[in-house]
Image (tube, rainbow, N blue to C red):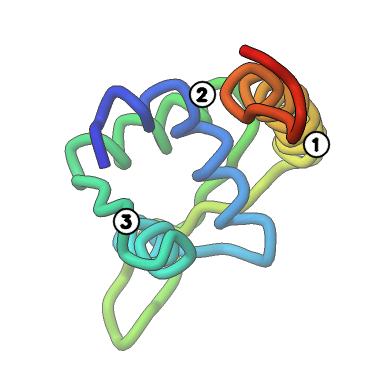
Amino acid sequence: MEADAVRGHLDAMLLAVLEPGPLHGYAVITAVRRRSGGALALRTGTVYPALHRLERLGLLRSRRRSVADRSRRCYELTDAGRRGLTAARSAWREFTAAIGAVLDLAPGSAP
């Protein structure tokens, strides 16, 4: 999948994979890949700056935790992050409905 197609939706995707609970950066990347059926393979150079930016914006918080006997920074949603995810989901549904209305030809209608 093209990087440009993902670019405008990265923040929402990161918030969504963190909704169930805290994850470290590589686990976030793995969760996106798994949830997209392998279609989205995000790079660390894309994900980590986005996680740091979302943390600066107050949508995430991070803490050092021991994961598999290694200290890792784990990210989790804040209350503002949960509200942001709800808003992003609503915007996504509106966007896909509008684009779908243009791209999908309704049965029996002329272009």
Foreground disc of the pair 2, 3: 3
Q: Which residue is mark 1?
A: 86
Residue appearing at x 51%, y 29% in the figure: 54
Q: Amino acid at mark 3?
A: Ala
**Which dot marks residue 39?**
3
Q: Which callout, 1 or 2, points at the residue further toward the start of the chain?
A: 2
Residue appearing at x 43%, y 65% in the figure: 31
Q: Is residue 49 left or right of 104 when viewed as pictured?
A: left
Q: Is residue 28 left or right of 78 when viewed as pictured?
A: left
Residue appearing at x 59%, y 44% in the figure: 15
Q: Extreme top residue here?
A: 111
In the rendered image, residue 80, in percent from the top left (x then y), is placed at 77, 31
Q: Quadrant of the C terminus?
A: top right
- Residue at disc 2, secondary structure: helix
CA separation in Å, label 1 and label 3: 24 Å
Name the foreground residue: 1 vs 20. 1
Q: Amino acid at mark 1?
A: Thr
Q: Amino acid at mark 2?
A: Arg
CA separation in Å, label 2 and label 3: 28 Å
Give the number of marks.
Answer: 3
CA separation in Å, label 1 and label 2: 19 Å
**Which dot marks residue 56?**
2
Name the foreground residue: 77 vs 13. 13
- Residue at disc 1, secondary structure: helix
Q: Is residue 43 above or below residue 23?
A: above
In the rendered image, residue 86, in percent from the top left (x then y), is placed at 80, 36
The picture quadrant where one finds residue 10 is: top left
